[in-house]
Image (cartoon, grey):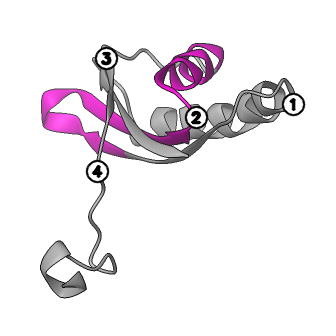
Amino acid sequence: MTPFMAECFWPGVTEQQLADAGARARRAADGINSNGVLARHTGSILVPADEIALCFFEAASIDAVSALSCRAAIPFERILQIVRLDDLTPSAKELR
């Protein structure tokens, strides 16, 4: 599974609406995954001042993320493959 991020310009979106979108994405993933297309929603970030939501996914392809986002009514502008680095992820330097 590859990590992806959907950039969503979403005027007026609230924290609750974004949480609801995440719940819809989790429900929609059940239907998509039963058809052999692998995708799952892994969380979101809301930037209220810019009216932007960043929705994170793991999926087999960008098309799977697009399909899941459409089924969940998440209004994305674009979907990008990402590299996610968390505090718990060893850095390249630490791996040497």
Tell which tag, 3 or 4, sits nearer the viewer.
Answer: 4
Name the spot of residue 20 as percent of width and height, x first.
59, 36
Distance from disc 4 to disc 1, alpha carbons, whole Å, reads 27 Å
As shown in the figure, which amino acid type bears the numbered disc 2?
A: Ala
User: Which residue is labeled 2 in the image?
Assistant: 60
The three-letter code of the residue at mark 1 reads Ser
x 49%, y 32%: residue: 17
The circle on residue 34 is 1
Chain-order first, disc 1 or disc 3: 1
> Label 4: few (<14), some or many (≥20) within 10 Å?
few
Find residue 87 and report its horizontal and vertical position in percent: 27, 78
Q: Give the side of residue 62 with respect to residue 84, left or right.
A: right
Write down the region rendered in magenta. Answer: 45-71
Look at the numbered disc 4 and give the secondary structure of its residue. Answer: loop
Res 83 label: 4
Q: Earlier in the sequence, mark 4 or mark 2?
A: 2
Residue under label 3: 78
Q: Looking at the image, which is closer to me, 1 or 88?
A: 1
**Between discs 4 and 1, the one toward the N terminus:** 1
Q: Position of residue 43 (x, y in %)?
A: 47, 49
Q: Are marks 1 and 3 in contact (CB under 8 Å)?
A: no
Q: Residue furthest right?
A: 34
Report the side of 61 relative to 32 (left or right).
Answer: left
